[in-house]
């Protein structure tokens, strides 16, 4: 062989290798990338909270994150390019606890007040709905708001004003799980009459009357009364459940949400979601939190063998069952707005039998635990269980967790437990302050939770107990304020920590940390482009952030420039 030719050949080969190495550094070998986002502020929420300029997607996954120059040259003629024009991008937001599937069965029938900051606008929405439905049809909502979120006036709704705007329809507006406002037609539908005794199915004293015995339209008395009314509200017709659920998913995408821990996945509803997944049309990811209901010792007896048979993780990265919850033993499920709990030893014994079975079968646990005595009592039980069946690495978490404290956090850290935090104050701040006084300023103690170093993530507990919009919750976490500006919580945290709790932490909580929660090569392309920069705008404006584009699995599922409607 001619030595000169050999040399030239090896130089050429070496050059090819060098060239290949350069390409490899920026672009894994394989077909061209499908989508490139450049000229943005990519808030990756990776472990170092890296900020990048550009990002490339192939198929349903992110393949590269870097500078404009690095990412631009990965494009092929077939690559779709989006110029972000400086806009901020964050990972698709994950709510670790929402009653999503249930909400879909009423969504389009409800007049939802989530994110509505004006009492006037709320009334206009009721009036508009009354004009579009038939006379006699219910105009209603089931929670997700309170009058304290309104910036123009926080006064309660009156029977008279609801009569004025909806004279021909019964109206029931449910304020969180605390209070329901009825108009005259609504009162009539429940046989609540002026000057007559209360109907027997309402808790004593729950129907508020004026001095003359006339019903004011307000029904109080906690969850018992509120739920009794909600149960009578019409669900969407069977042939409209699909359309209602799709409309709800669209609203979630519009708000920047792309994945959920779903409390209660009704087996009657799941096939519909599976069908959408098979058609590549499911635009949110659903990770179910389900358990075996038990409220008596006999039911516990029946539940134990069922727990042993539970099989989680049989699904995929769109629909899966991942956690046991959210209730373990019914009598120890703290009712919302109770001021104090008093867990009894015999109840805790039943709770422990069930939780022991969960631990023995190495199932992850996500358990409703709200009031401080309940949290203490559950931790006593878990510490005992842990001696026989260690719970570390099982991803056991206490959920809601508003009345928690530093001592409990230390106990949980020692057990290797986590906190799924659902700040009820976001819409219930006024109500919580009514019940707990100044203690409500520390509910939840967000800064204490953050400082403890425990793994924790955000959820809403929507759609009845709370509103669902993440930027309203993030605004609250950073400022301590409700959307009305009312300061209701003192333990604020940084924007970065709040965002991590809505993304990377929740990916871990739904067992998707390899796929979701940060914008990194190899992860699924779930992201949102924001209309303003979450990290730099005045904190009070975080609630006003609107996604302009939402992507799930590499598909654009919401685009503000083409979407209909204003909210
Ligand atoms: Zn709950």
Image (cartoon, grey):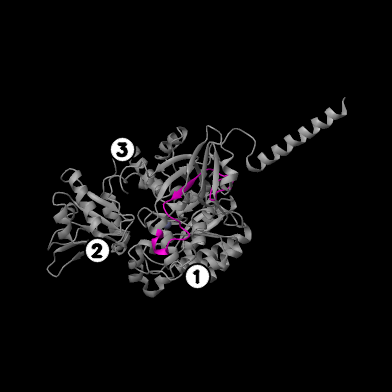
Q: Are marks 3 and 1 in contact (CB under 8 Å)?
A: no
Element carrying mark 2: loop
Quadrant in the picture for residue 485: bottom left
User: Can residue 141 be seen in the rendering of this structure?
Assistant: yes
Compute the Cα span from label 2 to label 3.
34 Å
- Which residue is at a point 55% across and 56% down the rendered structure image? 396
Q: Which x, y percent locates residue 260?
A: 46, 49
Q: Residues within 10 Å of mark 3 (few under 14, many from 20)?
A: some
What's drawn in magenta, residue-wise?
514-542
Q: Disc 1 or 2, which lies upstream in sequence? A: 2
Residue where numbered disc 1 is placed? 405
Q: Quadrant of ligand 1?
A: bottom left
Q: Which x, y percent locates residue 12?
A: 76, 32
Q: Are marks 1 and 2 in contact (CB under 8 Å)?
A: no
Quadrant in the picture for residue 473: bottom left
Q: Mark on residue 240?
A: 3
Q: Disc 3 or 1, which lies upstream in sequence? A: 3
Residue where numbered disc 2 is placed? 206
* Image quadrant in which the N terminus is located: top right
Q: Disc 2 or 3, which lies upstream in sequence? A: 2
């Amino acid at each position: 062989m001619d030595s000169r030719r050999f040399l030239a050949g090896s130089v050429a080969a070496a050059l090819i290798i060098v060239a290949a190495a350069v390409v490899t550094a920026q672009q894994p070998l394989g077909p061209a990338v499908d989508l490139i986002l450049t000229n943005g502020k990519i808030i990756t929420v990776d472990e170092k909270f890296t900020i990048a300029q550009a990002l490339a997607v192939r198929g349903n996954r992110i393949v590269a994150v870097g500078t404009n120059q690095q990412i631009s040259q990965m494009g092929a003629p077939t690559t779709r390019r989006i110029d972000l024009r400086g806009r901020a991008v964050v990972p698709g937001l994950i709510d670790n606890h929402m009653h999503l599937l249930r909400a879909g069965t009423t969504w389009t029938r409800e007049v939802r007040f989530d994110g509505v900051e004006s009492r006037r606008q709320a009334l206009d929405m009721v009036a508009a709905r009354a004009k579009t439905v038939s006379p006699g049809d219910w105009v209603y909502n089931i929670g997700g708001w309170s009058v304290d979120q309104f910036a123009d006036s926080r006064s309660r709704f009156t029977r008279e004003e609801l009569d004025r705007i909806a004279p021909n329809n019964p109206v029931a507006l449910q304020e969180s799980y605390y209070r329901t406002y009825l108009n005259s037609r609504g009162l009539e539908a429940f046989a609540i009459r002026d000057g007559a005794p209360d109907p027997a199915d309402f808790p004593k004293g729950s129907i508020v009357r004026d001095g003359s015995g006339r019903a004011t339209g307000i029904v109080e008395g906690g969850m018992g009364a509120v739920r009794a009314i909600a149960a009578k509200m019409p669900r969407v017709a069977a042939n409209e459940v699909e359309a209602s659920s799709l409309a709800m998913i669209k609203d979630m995408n519009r708000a920047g949400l792309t994945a959920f821990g779903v409390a209660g996945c009704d087996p009657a509803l799941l096939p519909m979601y599976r069908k959408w997944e098979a058609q590549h049309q499911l635009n949110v990811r659903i990770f179910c939190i389900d358990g075996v209901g038990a409220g008596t010792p006999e039911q516990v007896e029946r539940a134990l063998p069922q727990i042993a048979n539970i099989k989680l993780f049989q699904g995929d990265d769109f629909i899966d069952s991942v956690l046991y919850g959210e209730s373990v033993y019914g009598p120890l499920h703290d009712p919302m707005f109770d001021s104090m709990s008093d867990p009894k030893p015999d109840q805790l014994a039943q709770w422990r039998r069930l939780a022991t079975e969960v631990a023995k079968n190495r199932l992850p646990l996500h358990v409703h635990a709200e009031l401080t005595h309940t949290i203490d009592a559950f931790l006593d039980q878990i510490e005992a269980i842990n001696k026989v069946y260690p719970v570390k690495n099982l991803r056991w978490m206490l959920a809601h967790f508003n009345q928690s404290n530093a001592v409990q956090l230390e106990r949980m850290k020692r057990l290797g437990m986590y906190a799924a935090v659902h700040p009820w104050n976001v819409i219930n701040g006024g109500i919580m302050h009514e019940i707990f006084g100044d203690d409500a300023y520390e509910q939840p103690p967000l800064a204490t939770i953050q400082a403890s170093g425990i793994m924790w993530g955000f959820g809403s507990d929507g759609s009845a107990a709370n509103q669902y919009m993440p930027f309203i919750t993030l605004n609250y976490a950073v400022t301590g304020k409700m959307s009305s500006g009312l300061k209701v919580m003192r333990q604020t945290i940084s924007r970065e920590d709040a965002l991590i709790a809505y993304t990377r932490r929740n990916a871990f909580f739904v067992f998707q940390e390899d796929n979701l929660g940060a914008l990194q090569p190899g992860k699924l392309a779930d992201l949102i482009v924001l209309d303003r920069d979450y990290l730099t705008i005045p904190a009070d404006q975080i609630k006003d952030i609107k996604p302009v584009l939402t992507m799930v699995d590499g598909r654009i599922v919401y685009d503000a420039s083409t979407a209909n409607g204003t909210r």
